[in-house]
Amino acid sequence: MELLDQISFNLQNGFDKIVASLTKDAVEKQIPPKEILSNGLIAGMNIVGEKFKNHDIFLPDVLLAARAMNGAMEVLKPLLIKEGIPIRGKVVIGSVKDDLHDIGKNLVAILLKGAGFEVIDLGNDVPAEKFISVAREENAHVIGMSALLTTTMPVMKKVVDLAKDEGLFGKIRIVIGGAPVSKEYALEIGADAYSYDGANAVETVESFFPANSQ
Amino acid sequence: MIVDFAPEDVDLDRAAILRSQGIPEEAEFTENFELIYEGAIELFQKLAEPAGIIVGITISEFKEVFRGEGLNEPENPVEDIYRKSSYLALFAVTLGPVLSSKVTGLFDNGDYASGYMLDSVSSYAADKLTDLAAQHLQSELAVKEPAASSWRVLSYSPGYCGWNISGQKKLFEVLHPEEIGITLNESCLMIPVKSLSGVLIAGAGEIHEFVNSYPFCDTCRTKSCIERMRDLK
């Protein structure tokens, strides 16, 4: 089995230490980082995504693969930056102010990283202003917000309104999710999209970047 | 009354836990998946500190608690059900702070799969703990009132069935769940996160039956009323 196929295979099985070690081997063998990323890591994650969709594997298996992907990215990221290879997209993500639930948000962050996006995770209890300021400073492409309480959902509208006020609306796409949130609510507050789960959030964010889809 | 439970009191039904993750009964699992599941069960048994508080309340007193901040849906099933009850009690249950911290710690350390599974097991267990509180109340009532053994005790919580989440504030004022370590933040979120609160409504099974066609039923994600009403039969 070729080295990149081995990376893909071991990533699919969630063997994070082996994937990191094989990625280092690939770098030492002068395989271009972009090729390791595309034909090893993302190729593996794509298979994981397909198996997940087909119910051949389940979320814990996907999360193991994502951890392996993240470990390998620690090796590759400095090289990709050095070579000026653009990242797939940058996402600022967080649970909104006064909401301390973060499992769903964490899953989305992990899955987005696993899909090759750079994710800036602001954690939970994030004020509307912080979403905007960090997105601006980091030149983010997407803001992702999560709320699990109906009482905290209005913060999402505040972020959308702030983005409009600061001329960022349309430049930065805004995706919302969480148990009480709906497609209708996203429409009502003017968010770009609603995602109903982690896998759907990745598909939604990917749809914003059709040109560099892997 | 404060009720201490043991982790092993909570019946962790594997099929139900996996169903809550959207996994079908007939699914086959990888070896990794099995290890993660078993690890989460072990952690739960080791770290959970289940406790509950149950305080009886009259219908007229509960009317005020239920009114809360005045934000309930104008028509809701809880209003109809509690008025027909034979006994009411406010309750809160928690699995304690250590379990929640462990979930956070697992995610922080990059062990996402174990964090997710432990969170899932804990969410299921918190629901089961509410059932245990209901059973406890029923046993207590049956000692004083023989008819109580045939009653059905079901829980209803702010945030569901048209009872606005802001109702937590009034409920906490009367119940004092801080006695078992539960506090409420500004947005009515209970801390530790794996806690549940509400009212236990005891009475004949049929009082709990309603037609789930309220406007808010469309957006309800749990639809747990269907299963609960089916179990009444």
Image: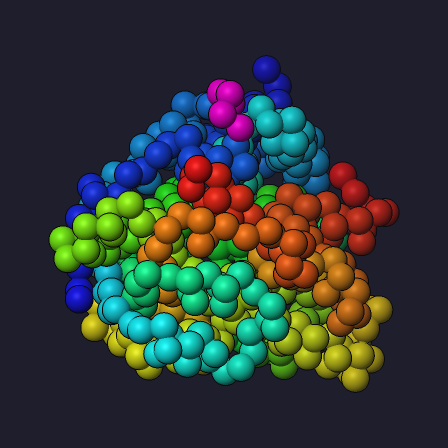
User: Is residue A210 shown in magenta?
Assistant: no
Quadrant of the drawing holding the N terminus of chain B: bottom left
User: Is residue B26 shown in magenta?
Assistant: yes
Residue at the (42%, 62%) spot, across then down = B84
Q: Of A11 and A22, which appears nearest the observer?
A: A11
List x then y, in percent, for residue A34: 70, 40
The stretch in magenta equals: B24-28
Q: Of B201 and A82, which appears nearest the observer?
A: B201
Residue at the (54%, 52%) spot, across then down = B210
Extreme residue toward the left, this view:
B143
List x then y, in percent, for residue A154: 64, 76
List x then y, in percent, for residue A180: 60, 61
Q: How is the image coloured?
A: rainbow
Residue at the (41%, 81%) spot, across then down = B64
Tell me: residue B55, above or below residue B14.
below
List x then y, in percent, for residue B180: 22, 68
Quadrant of the drawing holding the C terminus of chain B: top left
Looking at the image, residue A209 sits to the left or right of residue A40; the answer is: right
Tell me: residue A134, above or below residue A180.
below
Tell me: residue A112, above or below residue A182.
above
Quarter of image, res A177 = bottom right
How many marks overall?
A: 0
Looking at the image, residue A22 sits to the left or right of residue B154; the answer is: right
Q: Is residue B30 visible?
A: yes
Residue at the (58%, 24%) spot, across then down = A56
Q: Of B54 and A28, which appears nearest the observer?
A: B54
